[in-house]
Image: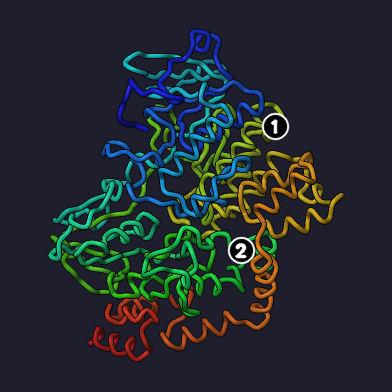
Amino acid sequence: MCGQKNPARQGPFALRKPQDGEAKMGLDVCIIGAGWSGLYACKYALENGLKPIVLERRDDIGGVWNYTDDPATTTVMKSTVSSSSRVVTEASDFFMDENVGHFMHHEEVVNYLRQYTEHFRLTEHIHLGCNVKAVKKVGPTWEVTYEQAGVTHVIRAAKLAVCAGSNHKQKPLSGPVSKFSGQLWHAGDLKEVRPGDFSEQDRVLIYGGGETASDLVDLLVKTPARVTWAIRGGQHFLRKTPFHSRPGPGLFRKHDFPLDQLASPLIAAASPFKKGAPGRRYIADFLSTGRLRGYFGHGVPVWRNRFRYGQQFFNKNGHAVEHVATGRVTPQNDVVAVRGNEVEFQSGERAAFTHVICCFGYQFDCPFLPQPYNRGDLDEHFHFVFPVDDPALAFLGFSRPIIGSIPLMTEMQCLWVFRVWAGKVSLPPAQEQRIRQQNLNQRWGQRLPGRGRMKTLVHPSTYAAHMMKAAYPDRKPGDVFKKNPLRALRFLTWIPSASMLRAFDPELGGAEFKRLWRQRRQGFLIGWLLPLWVVVGRLLRIENLIDWSIRRQSGTPLMVTAENEDMQKTEVDSVKLADYRTFDGPSAEAISEHSNKRAA
């Protein structure tokens, strides 16, 4: 969390040193990082009667959301707007101002975190400008060495919470693209893209299918450059807001209904993700693309893959796909070879580029931690949080949901971790933790075969169930609602958000529950009619008809299996890009014609 230092900073987040007694007496918890995860950790530590200290390297809170021009500091881009909606992102007990809309600019996020910090009186526990140099275990406690304003400090704490985030060390630019002779960038190198940064002579390749790639596409289409978007292995998209409400290609309104709220416990029961979300997949695709045949939220043949709906991370910035539909952006699949500035794709097409921007993401980087914890083997930790051999250490904010927000996942983890550290709940024996985590990893791998190298990717509702069961092992979900069936009925239409954590609290009064429900419930149309339509759609097999029409038009199955994967590569991925621009997919005649030409 490196950044520019400003010792003269004033105000509620001014730099401060620990008091003499803090260093000598020790603390209950040392929290490294004052981003979203670190602030949640501090709040839950205080809530459970623990004494925390938060060490942040930068001169302000907010982590990656606190934008800076400093190229040495990894932050969001200057134009970044949240990909998850406000309700799905905010804390369970401190709601965001509705006036910001459903999607927040990074400045609005940092402002919210400042309000959160002041509301829960976290300021006095936060120490800014603290560069953690080393952490080691001394007996039962953690010894943390850090520098602040050129002075070295050493503190001890019984517990250590690592909340430094994973967006600091860029993944290497490996593979064929590393041989590119033109301008080669990692996406993290770009803080902003201005219209004058590229000319008509520039041809730019965006390589990656994540949300950062979508952001870059949105920015590059505003320049004169020709843009190609290559995605390895295909991608699933979801638009921020419904297609019909868009003000133009690639645009959305912050106050329109967010599609990531197109869910509830009732909808999940009617259309479970583990079965590919039957009955609502085509609804989400239609709302994202405006077309029933907009499969995977894009309808682009070259980006199809073999994963069912909900088996892969969703790119929630799906509005960027519309630039492909208009022909402004050319879609491509994987890069297989690079010769100088010429790039060859899996489709067989070749093109010369002046710039390649690789959206490869980041890798775990906490060099201050001792071995083996600095390796980042988070998938070996119990629920991706506790190292099996040391329950006095926890990693918070490193799990990623296929849909939803990371802060939502982090608050679930904090709820559990600090109940453990406060002695309110116990962890299983180390060997049991190890076996259970191995079983969990196997099940996650089966449910999310598209997780790839993202080993901590989970489905949020399932992970939430794990966290609630771990935090309250003696409580069953139905116990909360037995005495009040009306509460259970209302809970069925609750928007998936952190506020659901409070809904399971048996001590929550009926009036407070009703107030929360009114604020975070689905409307009648989404809450009750949509689940009904999902069930009707499943009975009528509407998705089967849509899949049949796509298969009839393209000549290939919509979802690839091991038996037909080779056929897809030869018949779909090798179709000329001119055919992709129809957005409805190539015709069977086009596939046959191009396949014959390649065979000849």
Residue 350: image x %, image y %?
20, 71
Which color scheme is applied? rainbow
Q: Is residue 296 visible?
A: no
Residue 522: image x %, image y %?
65, 60
Q: The C terminus appears in which quarter of the rendering?
A: bottom left
- Dot 1 or dot 2: first in sequence order is 2
Per the rendering, the mark at residue 274 is 2
Query: At 37% from the left edge and 14% from the top edge, which residue is drawn?
Result: 152
Residue 78: image x %, image y %?
32, 47
**Dot 2 amino acid type:** Lys
On the image, numbered disc 1 is attached to which residue? 426
What is the CA distance from the residue labelled 1 to the residue labelled 2?
A: 30 Å
- Nearest the eye: 228 or 554: 228
Query: At 26% from the left edge and 46% from the top edge, which residue is drawn?
Result: 189
Residue 519: image x %, image y %?
66, 52
Examine the rendered structure and indicate whether residue 413 appears above or below residue 291: above
